[in-house]
Image: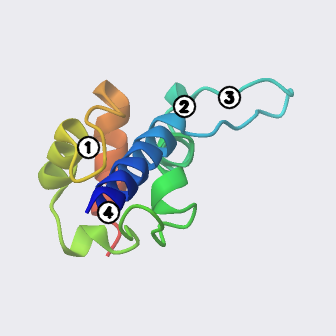
Amino acid sequence: MKKKLAALFMGTSLVLALAACGGGGSDDKGGKESASAGDPAKIFSQKCSSCHGENLQGGMGPKLADVGSRLSKDQIKTTIQKGRGGMPAGLIQGDELEKVADWLSKKK
């Protein structure tokens, strides 16, 4: 039982660490590109793809390639704002949240 609990704790810690990482891209000038550039695909890539996969295929987090067929834009926003399962709350906020939720809601 202790081994299972320890494994669950380590797995949850890993998910949270990876979710908070988000990668980073670079612009054509060789500098770090800001997620606030406004492109929802870039925001997703930087803040979500480490768990949900670069192509929305899933991984540690669920597949999102067809999330718009299961959840509305508002439901997607709520999930991002409040978190769910091992996903921490508030990884994306403000205008970025609106853009990513709208973008994901169109994935059918």
Q: Earlier in the sequence, mark 4 or mark 2?
A: 4
Between circles 1 and 4, the one closer to the viewer is 4
Q: Earlier in the sequence, mark 4 or mark 3?
A: 4
**Which residue carries the number 4 mark?**
4
Q: Give the left or right position of residue 71, taking residue 42 as reference.
A: left
Residue at 26 percent across and 43 percent down: it is 80
The type of residue carrying mark 1 is Ile
The type of residue carrying mark 2 is Ala
Q: Earlier in the sequence, mark 1 or mark 3?
A: 3
Task: Measure the alpha-carbon separation of dots 4 and 2.
Answer: 37 Å
**Which residue carries the number 3 mark?**
33
CB atoms of marks 2 and 3 within 8 Å? yes
SS for callout 1? helix
The type of residue carrying mark 3 is Glu
Between circles 2 and 1, the one closer to the viewer is 1
Residue neighbourhood size for the residue with mark 2, other residues' Cα within 10 Å, grouped as few (<14), some (14–19), many (≥20): some
SS for callout 4? helix
Is 87 situated above or below 58?
above
SS for callout 2? helix
CB atoms of marks 4 and 3 within 8 Å? no
